[in-house]
Amino acid sequence: MKLVTFTHMGETRIGVASGNYVYAIGSIPGYPREMTELLAAGQALLGDLASRIERHCERIALADIHLEAPLLRPPKFLAIGLNYADHITEKGGSRPAFPTIFNKQSTCANGPYDPIHKPGVSEQVDYEGELGFVIRRRCRHVPAARAPEVIAGYLIVNDVSVRDWQARSPTLTLGKSFDTHGPIGPWIVTPDEIGDPHALGVRTYVNGEPRQTFNTRDMIWNCYRLVELLSTVFTLEPGDVISTGTGRGVGMRRDPPSFLQPGDVVRIEIDAIGAIENRVIEEPADATM
């Protein structure tokens, strides 16, 4: 299934996308009306939902809705740095013994087709196409072999990065957390539709020009190993988003460096998931106090 959060006629709801339609889950009595609640309700409910959507859910044309970030405010938005050897090489570094893990503040979450703001304080806004996954239940100390049991599904992430602000703090958080700098979506694709999450092609385009082409098979720490590492330290919760890192081809490593400017369009595609596409705009005046 493709789980979505969408707005229709001024109301934000959750549903299942299928073909050219969205089936609104809220029309089933007693079903959750928010994505983290749906994930927390458990696998049995999702299995029941799959058999009921066409008979019991209101059907709305995809063309008539606006897709939001599947998780409007993820409980945690975690990201992994230096998880592809070719990206490490282009940075001039060596393979680390342990992954770089940082927070993107949850307020950066952005819709799959909504604009990315270029902040007035930087000229170094960059893209990073990444595979992300979503946690479906509260868990701790999950061995890698059992990690698939706690993953609700997969989505696309643009880990938008403000490079000069990223360099100002060793935690990376400042440069990774500007508002709108976490486009995710277009939906959460459940594992049964993904197959092997470690065999997916990822492609990033800027204004139609190919910038990144890599495959998730080349991760150093794969999704399951990341679940094991993270859950060793803290509890993972329904709706947590983990973005797994990017491959070679980011703008700052081009010669000369090529940073995003207003009017640029960033498109990221991942096999078995789809695509997100975001236009860069100047940070609006109403984004200030």
Image: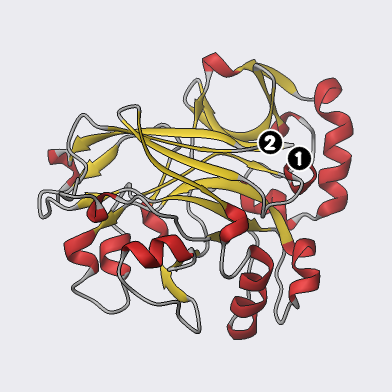
Q: Is the image coloured rainbow, by chain, by secondary structure, or in one colour?
A: secondary structure
119 lies left or right of 55: left
Quadrant for residue 232, please give it: bottom right
207 lies left or right of 46: left
Read off the residue under disc 1.
193
From this view, report whether residue 33 is shown above or below residue 136: above
Residue occupying the point 88% across, 40% down: 48
Q: Which sits earlier in the primary sequence, circle 2 or circle 1?
A: 2
104 lies left or right of 21: left
Locate residue 1, reporting x and y percent: 74, 37
Q: Rounded to the nearest whole Å, what is the CA distance between mark 2 and mark 1? A: 9 Å
Would you call the spot at circle 1 few (<14 residues within 10 Å), some (14-19), or many (20 or more)?
some
Read off the residue under disc 2.
2
Quadrant for residue 205, please give it: top left
Query: Identity of the amino acid at label 1?
Result: Glu
Marks 2 & 1, CB-CB < 8 Å contact? yes
Q: Mark 2: which secondary structure?
A: strand
Locate residue 239, reporting x and y percent: 60, 57
Query: Identity of the amino acid at label 2?
Result: Lys
Q: Mark 1: which secondary structure?
A: helix
Q: Would residue 73 be visible to someone looking at this image?
A: yes
Locate residue 204, reporting x and y percent: 42, 40
